[in-house]
Image (tube, rainbow, N blue to C red):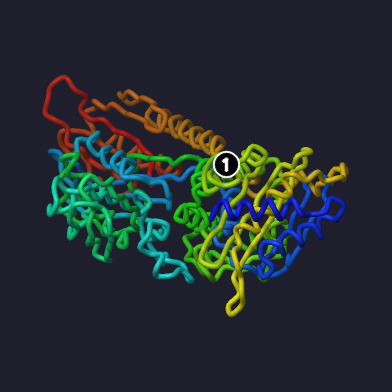
Amino acid sequence: MKRSLTGTVLMALSALSNGASIQSEVDKLVNRINPNVNLGIVVLDLTSGQTLYRRNAERLYIPASNMKLFSEAAALMVLGPDYRFKNQLNVSAGKIEQGVLQGNVYVQLSGDPSFSRNDLNMLLSSLKEWNINTIQGNVYIDSSFSGVDPYPPGWLTTDLSYSYGAPNAPVMVDSNRLTVTVNPGAQTGDPAIVEADDGGGAITLNNLATTKANAKGCGVGFSLDQNNHLTVRGCVGVGQWAVQQRLAIKNPLMYAQAMIKNQLIKANIQLNGQVQLGKTPAGSLLIATQYSKPVSQLMADTLKPSDNLYADSLYLHAAEKLKGAPVNWRGAEPLIKNFLQSQTGIDFSNAIFTDGSGLSRYSLVTPEQTISLLKFLYQRFPLSYEYISALPISGRDGTLQKRFRIPIQQGFVRAKTGTMTGINSLSGYLYTANGHTLAFAMYVNRQPGKASGPGRPVLDAIITYFLQKNPESSRLSRVFSPHQRISFQLNPTQAEKQKVHQARWRRLESAIRTALRGQSVNIIYRGNELIVNDNQADPGKVWSTLQSVVKKYPFAVMLSSKTLPINSSGSPALLWIQAPDTSNQTQRIWSIREAA
């Protein structure tokens, strides 16, 4: 099939007249391959500014994964390329006595699609740094997606079992995906060997798969239900390669709850309470922080493999930043559309953004809207390199790794693919034989009740045609307001935020040193922490001083001492850690730390 399609494309290309216009040549090319195709397309020469080809440019099409072009553009412009998701571990005010935390633990998850079991383990293991062996209270998962519906409108139920249909809500760990491996047994009749890499996520396995003499007629089926019960059926042949399948976790909360319990057991921390959803109270003590990769890298992790969960997470997070509070799918659409329209000047009034991934069949965009977005991004230096570098490269990586592989094609196309039943899309950039950069937006949608024919061969033929084309005009395109500031540029950078954060700590350090002047204490600055070593007879002197300073500089306090010598009510929040009874040690160690 691949050879015959390639042959058809080459024959169609060779039959074109050299003297014909680009519009008529491409029309003939399309008609030779599939005269019934419902194709919408715009091709724009970004070097000259000329539109080279248009067809049904204003018609609305289901974009499939080309929807990611819009959601990732919004995320890049709202968040900025250096933005990182921040996940944190906090504890409520209380005390740690003989290794027992008399309080709750809060795992704050920001909607980071890359948050993994290793990241979770890092956060929970930080409790051991404070000699916590037992949690008397609960562990609360504070997720920004706790109020979000797991699936957007327009997703098909048949998609929900596969890894590409993994839900974003209410929590995400390991992208809410599970890898299952099925190996044959040693001999015929043995049960197949099934392993689920759940990381302690409490997957209950029902193995009904068997081993047969050979693999002929065999197959393996997987079913994971809402209680995270995995059933594996079918057969594998003796000596057959292992079968691997990625599945979507149907109950992410149950999965995360079990994983947290398992990680605490591994860290030798006993939990006497429960793991459940909840909110972190103001003033809680920050124990540990974990950061994701920057958005510029998360975009590549999204666009190159066409990861739906990543795209939807960035889409919802950008909407949350625009509103200043978490939003559901229907609330995100007007926020993202209005933002993109205000930033780019593109009319999105008739577009429908049901999700950020394009897996919804309800989303609609036009080729004209798509080409206008690609043009805007290309002409904005603060955006163009990060955006274009995140796209799949023809013949090299991502969803274009096996397309456009011959020398005149390989590496000269950077574009986003889109594929669903009856839908093909391809939009991005290409580099012509004479050095022009073209932007293109192409959609094929099957029309109900009408003959359609294949879509992808048409798209591939058009790309091959333009790769070999030598656009004649050398007139350079005029860029409208190329130095106009992008939204994220109006906000402080991550480095600037860190500088402000450090300056605040320096001001706090100065305030603490000034307030404690004359007291017999040592003050040690450690970046995001101030240590006060206190050997004074009166334990209330430092505490009363801290209570006065906290009115201007919010913080939380850890106190390590043999006994709790003060009334710890009021502000700041205080966590008391019982120190071991040894000689030659400081009576009290006050640790001033960031508050949630």
| Depth order, front residue of 51/592 | 51
In this rendering, position of residue 343 left or right of residue 245: right
Residue 222: percent from left, percent from top: 28, 60
In this view, the residue farthest toward the top is 584
Q: Could you tell me the amino acid type at mark 1? A: Gly
Q: Which residue is drawn at 59% across and 42% down?
A: 405
Horizontal and vertical percent position of residue 558:
28, 38
Measuring from the top left, give residue 466's x and y in whole percent.
74, 48
Residue 584, quarter of the rendered image: top left
**Quadrant of residue 394 within the rendered picture:** top right
- Quickly name the residue at label 1: 395
| Relative to 249, 293 lies left or right | right
Badge 1 element: loop
In this rendering, the answer to whether 193 lies above or below 227 is: above
Name the residue nearer the viewer: 356 or 278.
356
Residue 322, percent from left and from top: 57, 57
Q: Is residue 591 visible?
A: yes
Residue 334 visible in the shown view = no
Nearest the viewer among 261 and 359 is 359
